[in-house]
Image (cartoon, helix red, strand yellow):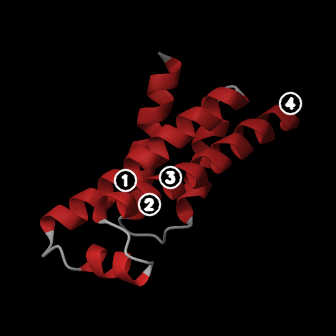
Amino acid sequence: MKQIAFILALAAAGFGTQQVLPWWTLPLVAILVAAVAGVRPGAAFWGGLLAGALLWGGMAWWLHQSGEKLLIPRIGQMLGGLSVHILTLVTALLGGLLCAAGALTGSLGRRLSR
């Protein structure tokens, strides 16, 4: 139950900050949420990976669906002909890894500060 609350809190805080701040604030939010929540390092990593992947993958999919569907295919062509689906998965993976690294850092930092 604590893990689900951590994932939801991380996704909500990440979504809120990503609306007004740059992309690199996601790991900073993950550091703060993991440190405050006090989750174990392994749980922080996997929870951060899931929250970040769902957040960035969901946002990429939503932006593609709500727009004219021109930007992602053009970026895919520039990157060697990647499809929209592969590019969305790559975006989700990058967001997940960023968030996981931040959450792991916050969890380990809390452990060190004791």
* Residue type for callout 1: Gly
The quarter of the image holding the C terminus is top right
- Provide the secondary structure element on which disc 2 rests: helix
Q: Which residue is identified by label 3?
A: 93
Dot 3 or dot 1: first in sequence order is: 1
Quarter where residue 88 is shown? bottom left
For residue 94, above or below residue 96:
below
Dot 4 or dot 2: first in sequence order is: 2
Q: Residue at x 52, y 23 (%)?
A: 3
**Mark 3, residues whose alpha carbon is within 10 Å: few (<14), some, or many (≥20)?**
some
- Provide the secondary structure element on which disc 3 rests: helix
Q: Nearer the viewer, residue 45 or 73?
A: 73
Q: Which residue is identified by label 4?
A: 114
**Mark 2, residues whose alpha carbon is within 10 Å: few (<14), some, or many (≥20)?**
many
Q: Which residue is identified by label 2?
A: 91
Q: Which residue is identified by label 1?
A: 57
Q: Residue at x 22, y 58 (%)?
A: 62
Q: Residue at x 14, y 65 (%)?
A: 66
**Mark 4, residues whose alpha carbon is within 10 Å: few (<14), some, or many (≥20)?**
few
Q: Are marks 1 and 2 in contact (CB under 8 Å)?
A: yes
